[in-house]
Image (tube, rainbow, N blue to C red):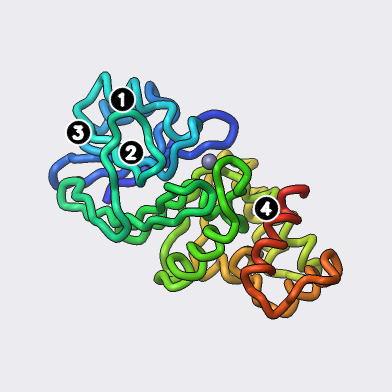
Amino acid sequence: MHWEVIRAGADNWSYLLGDPLTHAAAVVDPLNAEEILARLRQGRWNLVAIFLTHGHPDHTGGCPRLLEATRATVWSHPPDGVTGARALSDGSEIEVGSLQVKVLHTPGHTAGSACYLVEDKFITGDTVFLAGAGNCLFGGNVDDLYQSFREKILPLDPGLGLCPGHDYAENNLCFALSLEPGSDVIQAKLSEARKAAAEGGVPASTLAEERRYNPFFRFAEAALRSALARSFPSLDLSDPAACFAAIRVLRNSW
Ligand SMILES: [Zn+2]
């Protein structure tokens, strides 16, 4: 699979994936349409699909221009989307040439948030970030986000590479470190993320790594629970959904 990361705005990432056999391509969460069109021309890619992880404008802003310039179909999971988008359903697979893109409905950041699986990539929009999770402040629901993590994301292959919608790694890792100040793993990843940012690169992560530093994967760990108990003395630490929601509350004001 051909794979490109396209940075746009302050910290958005769009993704271009292509099938080298047929030159069919797709983009996920287009923002800078002119840059995407230039990359398509450069690689002689035929854009057949635009996948949206959710309907927030910083993930859909490039759609009108791409639809004007190509014959691509826009896909999103209801109720999120843009005018003219076709509706996806959980578990469905869309072909991009010989590539299969699998859809996971992962509500929480928004009601129609979706993640995509293609080969070894897990494209998460604003549902999962490196060391973080999406906020639930703009049409979201934290109980849904917890269920998405528990039922859809935690059971996935830990070797999948995380491809989030924003570069929030440094801030998220600082937050993670505030909860687990003694963690060498978080400290090492923070150094790695700072180095990647300084070089204009993309910090890499896998789901296996997320389990070692992402508080939203670690809500049941003893270290996290004691940090939560300090901030929320009456929190029921035996309730994983309540712990997950408490981490979200702390992160909102970080
Ligand atoms: Zn969003």
Name the secondary structure under disc 1. helix
Q: Are marks 4 and 1 in contact (CB under 8 Å)?
A: no
Q: Are marks 2 and 3 in contact (CB under 8 Å)?
A: no
Residue identifier under label 3: 46
Residue identifier under label 2: 27
> Quick one: which residue is furthest to the left in this view?
22
The residue lying at 77 percent from left, 65 percent from top is 179
- At label 4, which amino acid type do we have? Asn
Q: Residue 66, labelled with which disc?
A: 1
Name the secondary structure under disc 3. strand
Picture layout, residue 144 above or below residue 168:
below
- At label 2, which amino acid type do we have? Val
Q: Quadrant of residue 155?
A: bottom left
Residue identifier under label 4: 172
For label 1, count other residues whose C-alpha is less than 10 Å away and answer few (under 14), some (14-19) or many (20+): many
Q: Where is residue 51 in the image (x, y as percent from the top left)?
A: 33, 42
For label 4, count other residues whose C-alpha is less than 10 Å away and answer few (under 14), some (14-19) or many (20+): many
Looking at the image, tell me whether mark 4 or mark 2 is earlier in sequence order. 2
- At label 3, which amino acid type do we have? Asn
Camera-side residue: 220 or 202?
220
Q: Distance between the residues labelled 2 and 3?
A: 11 Å
Q: Distance between the residues labelled 4 and 1?
A: 32 Å
Looking at the image, tell me whether mark 2 or mark 3 is earlier in sequence order. 2
The residue lying at 77 percent from left, 68 percent from top is 180
- At label 1, which amino acid type do we have? Leu
**Relative side of 38 to 218, left or right:** left
The residue lying at 63 percent from left, 73 percent from top is 240
Picture layout, residue 120 above or below residue 22:
below
Q: In which quarter of the image is residue 121?
A: bottom left
Looking at the image, tell me whether mark 1 or mark 2 is earlier in sequence order. 2
Name the secondary structure under disc 2. strand
